Amino acid sequence: MEILRELKKLALFKGCPDQDLTRMTNCFKAEITSYGKGEVIINQSSDAGRVYLILKGEANVEHEDMFGNIAIILNLKAGDFFGLEEAYADKSTYKDALVSAEKSVVASFDRAKIISPCSNNCPCHQLLAKDMMKMISARSLALTDKIKHLSQRGIKDKVLSYLETQSRIASSSYFEIPFNKTELASYLAVERSALSTVLGKLKREGVIDFDKKRYHIKIKNQEE
Amino acid sequence: MEILRELKKLALFKGCPDQDLTRMTNCFKAEITSYGKGEVIINQSSDAGRVYLILKGEANVEHEDMFGNIAIILNLKAGDFFGLEEAYADKSTYKDALVSAEKSVVASFDRAKIISPCSNNCPCHQLLAKDMMKMISARSLALTDKIKHLSQRGIKDKVLSYLETQSRIASSSYFEIPFNKTELASYLAVERSALSTVLGKLKREGVIDFDKKRYHIKIKNQEE
DNA sequence: CCCTTTTTGTTGCAAAAACAACAAAAGTTC
DNA sequence: GAACTTTTGTTGTTTTTGCAACAAAAAGGG
């Protein structure tokens, strides 16, 4: 089965023998779908019946507010999930949309099977529960990081806060981000053209350098 | 024991018989401490060895950035925890501080005992695990809500987005928020005086009314 | 009740961001 | 490679926010 091959690549299932994986995917009613760039995987406000797991590519969690503005909340990569919080917190609808950011492959599972102990007594299910806990916790910490970026006073500080976090994640002053300039503006909740101006200034000042999605922090903020 | 009385009031432990509660609190090495307004319960960057549970009063999760600006990330009430994400995601330090927002009573537990199945086989421990999952998920959703407020274009939209969420939580157009104006500015990451101006304008326009920490949304944003 | 501290509202000014419109550059498609 | 689409940078104008300083109001503490 193709599902198996993809799942096995993820850290989440690395401890699972094939046999157990098959049993689990059956139990979870797993389904796999491919999406092209910009395709909506699941719509904002729709029924939260399934949990989604990115197998390949990337997807963005997006939110449209009452004025029609669309903000990118979070970028998800292979191994990341969507909808798990709603499942555990028992929310009946998603409050955000999941949109494929490039060609992607996404698995979805029956939410009820994921959150409650399986009657089939799947061997890896308990292990999985702990991993889920870890993933939700990591998500929560990531959201807190984002709040710190958004809490910065100006565009310059917002973007530097974000880039420094990305640099830390990559453990290098050279790194690639998952957003183009338009998407970055949406992620940081600022005007695209204003962001462009600020980035240009930072480049001219020699603080950072960038090309496409690749960035380089040349001078780090040396306080504290 | 005093601990018992306080714990029993929380939804988290409502299913637990006294006997099991006692066993658990011993097992978790529970400690209880009282704090006055403004007192630091746990410092940013300190070792993340314990998990904190608010028993009485309120506390704020605060973050100081490299410029010395302090932002209120989140307000915690009785029944809310701090440090659980770090425990499950295996982070060794807290990246934020926990500060008592008023007179409060806080329990703390050994993080290792909380996250791994107890060898004593405490009867409620498994039940607790599921509740933890629910709480972390709820936290994650709350952080996403906050990101939506911070993603709004101006102060006016930020504050209205926040107030509408609070109104929804209270299921009433009359509600009380946990922040004074200074704290609200810090929570929404805007200038206090600018917020004051905007709030005054919204009041004069008849959109909202407020007194101290009590607010009333008179005209709801009627789009979408 | 007086004194002190904290909170809140106000104002003028400077700085920054939003907005709009456009042009250049890069990427896609056929 | 020509035509089209998307992304990016630029500029000028308007609006908003940040900042600083101050005064009034409220809260807290002997």
Image (cartoon, coloured by chain):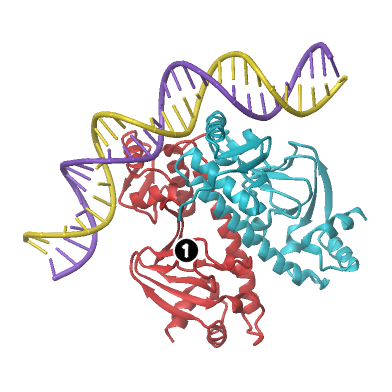
Chain colours: A cyan, B red, C yellow, D purple
Q: Which quadrant holds the N terminus of chain A?
A: bottom right
Q: In the depicted view, which residue is nearer to us: A212 or B152? A: A212
Q: Which quadrant holds the C terminus of chain A?
A: bottom left
Q: Is residue B207 left or right of residue B93?
A: left
Residue B131: image location, x then y, percent: 60, 69
Secondary structure under the numbered disc 1 in the rendered image: loop
Work out whether B107 lies above or below B196: below
Residue B141: image location, x then y, percent: 58, 54
- Residue pictured at 83% horizontal, 43% vertical: A34
Q: In the depicted view, which residue is nearer to us: B128 or C7? A: C7
Q: In the figure, residue A71 lies in which quadrant?
A: top right
Residue C15: image location, x then y, percent: 39, 33
- Residue pictured at 83% horizontal, 71% vertical: A120
Counting every numbered tag in the picture gives: 1
Q: Residues within 10 Å of mark 1 (few under 14, many from 20)?
A: some
- Dot 1 amino acid type: Gln
Q: In the figure, residue B86 lies in which quadrant?
A: bottom right
- Residue pictured at 57% horizontal, 46% vertical: A162
The reply to whether residue A64 is visible in this rendering is no
Residue B161: image location, x then y, percent: 48, 43
Q: In the depicted view, which residue is nearer to us: A163 or B213? A: A163
What is the chain letter for disc 1? B
- Residue pictured at 34% horizontal, 33% vertical: B205
Q: Is residue A164 left or right of residue A59?
A: left
Residue behind mark 1:
B44
